[in-house]
Image: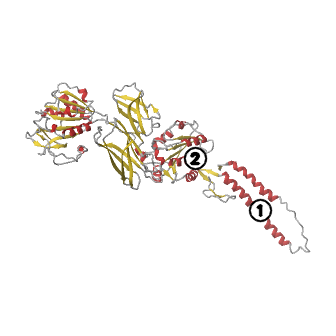
Amino acid sequence: MSFLYPEFLFGLFSLAIPVIVHLFNFRKSKKVYFSSTRFLENIKKASSQKLKIKHLLILLARLLFLLFLVLAFAQPFLPSTNKNPQAGSVYIYLDNSSSMSNRVDGTITSLEMGIDYIAKILEIYPENTNYKLLTNEFAPFSNALKSKSEVEELLTELRLSNISRSFPEAYSRLVSQTLLASEQSKDLYIISDFQQSTIGLSGQLHPDTTDQLYIAPVFFDEVKNVSIDSVFLSNPFLVANEKNQINVILRNGGTEEVVDLPVKLFINEIQSASSMVDIPASGTATLDFEIAYNLQNVNKCRISFEDYPVTFDNDFYFVLKLDNKIDILEIRSSDMASPVEQVFGNPGLFNFNMQQAGNIDYSRIRLVDMVIINGLDNIDRSLAQELSTFVAQGGTLCLVPGSQPDLPTYHYLLPGLDATKGDTSQVDMAMPDLSDPFYDNIFESQSTQVDMPYAQPVLSWQGEQMSLLKLKNNLPFLSAFRSEGTIFVFSAPFEPAYTNFHRHALFVPVMYRMATMSKKTFEKAYFEINAPAIRLRLDNLHKQEIFALSNGQSELIPNQRVSTNELILELPKHAIEPGFYYLTLQSDTVDVLAFNRNKAESDLRQLSLEEITSIFSGHPSVSVFDANDADNFSKELKKINLAYLYGNMPLCCPFCFYWLKCC
């Protein structure tokens, strides 16, 4: 038998008091004379025996009263078979991710509940116990054992973290090193909200059987939360003063519909749009914000709404840029100006280059977004091979045939295209299917009373393709063939004798859409803090250059490396905050980046107690707590760790008559 507070055993000396009182009776006797005592003798003997028994019972009651009173304060216990409560070291992991800001027990956050749990753990172990405290930052203080007072001080400094950790990741770090040479076994505590989206408990677990692992889940009152799932542009190529839309998908993680939620769009800290949205329970809704004017080259944007009690994901940051030019290369037979050069001649939007078929720089092909073969009757086999590689790597090819196409050479480039000579008659084009995603946001209004261009095709084809423009005789004029990249094929050359399409109002928007779809690497509008690394495409990179990230309040230099024209940055997750960061080189701003928390953190659905228990059911060294507040956690902790001499029966204090809770 052991005692939690053995110093109270000195109170057993008080047992001598009732014994002394019993042995030394200081009352003086008084004689009473009677004329005859012969008839009273038997009665006197009987009364003396009863008094003696009564006094002994009173003495025993007094002794037992004092004994149990002392034991109640000393708290005797029998060590449990699965635990040594005198363990020399205790390792604790506390999940302090953003989701732990959700409420439990109506008033306090999950993080505060977890801190209360740790306080109860500190109470049950002896003063000389060593502790390791680990949080999501994997901070340096977790690399050394701490005393009880040091852990209590650390608990006052704990704050929510932007970093999410899975269970295997946290457990592996918790047991990754033994901090005390004499340790043979440890007590491990995992305190977490066990989110389904981040906990990562789908695989097999193999906890060390020499350690005792305790799982302490913290359960939310409710999982109500609205978050932003994604933000994207209707037309990914943003052009100044041209109409575009920001599409925002909002997700409702609660079981009740959200009605009339106000959502605001800020561009460069100026509110530019707002809207109200209804989101079905456990569903999504999409908002569209139109943008067109007053955009800068780099625009810092923020979507904001108010949703309680979980507020960490009420703001979403992203960057819109106007300076993404599309690289276009035209290969034609002559150096005369062509309609293609005219349509892509805007240097603010396109980097346009032209090469003649007899003098092609093949290395240039690999660096552009779209190649246009314009008016070539014969396609050289080496050129066809280079273009095939270009398309296989995700490039976009536009083929405008010559007036006398050599079909065998075309087959080098398009082996899957069953091309034949086209019909020589002139036919008007049919109205395009404006519901096709290719034509999204091209036309402000739709009308069937439109004069369509004519065409006299020199090519015709069969097979799997997406028809974008057709003639009224149902023959194709423009089709898209998709594989790793995209090949657009016209059936007639851009010459007045064969078509007036290149002079029609439809020509510019169709060519622009083909160009915007060809952009290989759109810069991401935002990044997640949990991403291990991000890739940025920059020109004129040198391996000796050192880039830094700054948000105006702090500056940090991440691990970085250069690969061709890409800068790869390894994010210091513990130091990045949601918001905007400037990428700087020698105090010059190179780029602006937006960072947001991990979207999975906004999904507050949790594993149930039954699911957690089932996951760990095959591991005898693992215990799962069933508690919903700090007091119940303390009871469960003692129930698991200590077999009390008095079981669960409470003791009654003789002084105040309140039930003692064995705490």
Label 1, label 2: how far apart the Cα atoms are: 46 Å
x, y (%) of residue 177? Answer: 52, 37
Q: Given the image, on which type of amino acid does mark 1 rest?
A: Leu
Which residue is rendered at x = 46% and y = 50% of the image? Answer: 309
Q: Give the mark nearer the N terminus: 1 vs 2.
A: 1
Q: Position of residue 497 (x, y in %)?
A: 9, 36
* Residue tagged 1: 56
**Residue nearer the viewer, 13 or 113:** 113
Front one among 138 and 184? 138
Given residues 283 and 626, the one toward you in this image is 283
**Which residue was labeled with disc 2?**
119
66 vs 501, left or right, is right
Task: Say what amino acid the circle numbered 2 marks.
Answer: Ala
Q: Is residue 45 left or right of residue 477?
A: right
Q: Is residue 510 above or below residue 6?
A: above
Q: Secondary structure at mark 2?
A: helix
Image check: 489 left or right of 166?
left
Residue 573: which quarter of the image? top left
168 relative position to 370: left or right: right
Residue 453: x and y in percent read 14, 41
x, y percent for residue 21:
80, 58
- Disc 1 on helix, strand or loop? helix
> Disc 1 vs disc 2: which is toward the camera?
2
Q: Residues within 10 Å of mark 1 (few under 14, many from 20)?
A: few
Q: Residues within 10 Å of mark 2 (few under 14, many from 20)?
A: some
